[in-house]
Image: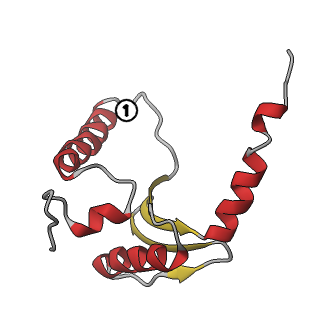
Amino acid sequence: MIIDAAGVPETYRDFYAAAPEGRAATIAGLRQLADWLEGHPDVPVPLDVDVLLHTSAEDDYNGRQAVRKIAAAMGRPMTVKRTAYEAAVSFGPVRFRVVHVMASRMGAHEALMSYRDNVQVTP
């Protein structure tokens, strides 16, 4: 693992992810959630769970490379979809995905969202 001058693993810079010091807290929170659900059989759980990690890369080349790194750690292939690069690993009905949305798709989304303040819905 390559660590930069600030003490941050190189891979973390490529994602919207918990900082290294927050990683343990996030993992502990996931375990606490599982324990809580197990202890409360009266509370329904979803049929499936999708944990999603997005890249923070501003271009498709770096986004693709970031997804490839995590895909390699997963031992899974990176898939190329029409608008995104993705890799996933499943644990039963729980899936962890890493995604980079292609710049062309993000541009279309940002253009659409630029109208959000112009539409006023009255009750």
Task: Determine whether the residue tagged by mark 1 lies in a helix, strand or loop.
Answer: loop
* Residue 101, x across and y down, in percent: 58, 66
Q: Relative to residue 42, is residue 82 drawn left or right?
A: right
Front one among 30 and 9: 9
Name the residue located 22 percent from the left edge and 50 percent from the top edge: 23
Name the residue located 53 percent from the left edge and 72 percent from the top edge: 59
Q: Quadrant of residue 77?
A: bottom left
Front one among 87 and 59: 59
- Few, some or many C-alpha atoms within 10 Å of disc 1 (few <14, some 14-19, many ≥20)? few
Coloring basis for residues? secondary structure
Q: Is residue 59 above or below residue 7?
A: below
Residue projecting furthest to the front: 5
Q: Is residue 48 above or below residue 58?
A: above
Considering the image in quadrants, where does the C terminus appear?
top right
Q: Is residue 19 above or below residue 101?
A: above
Task: Count up the numbered dots.
Answer: 1
* Residue 80, x across and y down, in percent: 58, 81
Q: Is residue 55 above or below residue 84?
A: above
Q: Relative to residue 25, is residue 69 drawn left or right?
A: right
Q: Relative to residue 92, is residue 122 drawn left or right?
A: right
* Residue 120, x across and y down, in percent: 84, 25
Q: Amino acid at mark 1?
A: Pro
Q: Which residue is mark 1?
A: 41
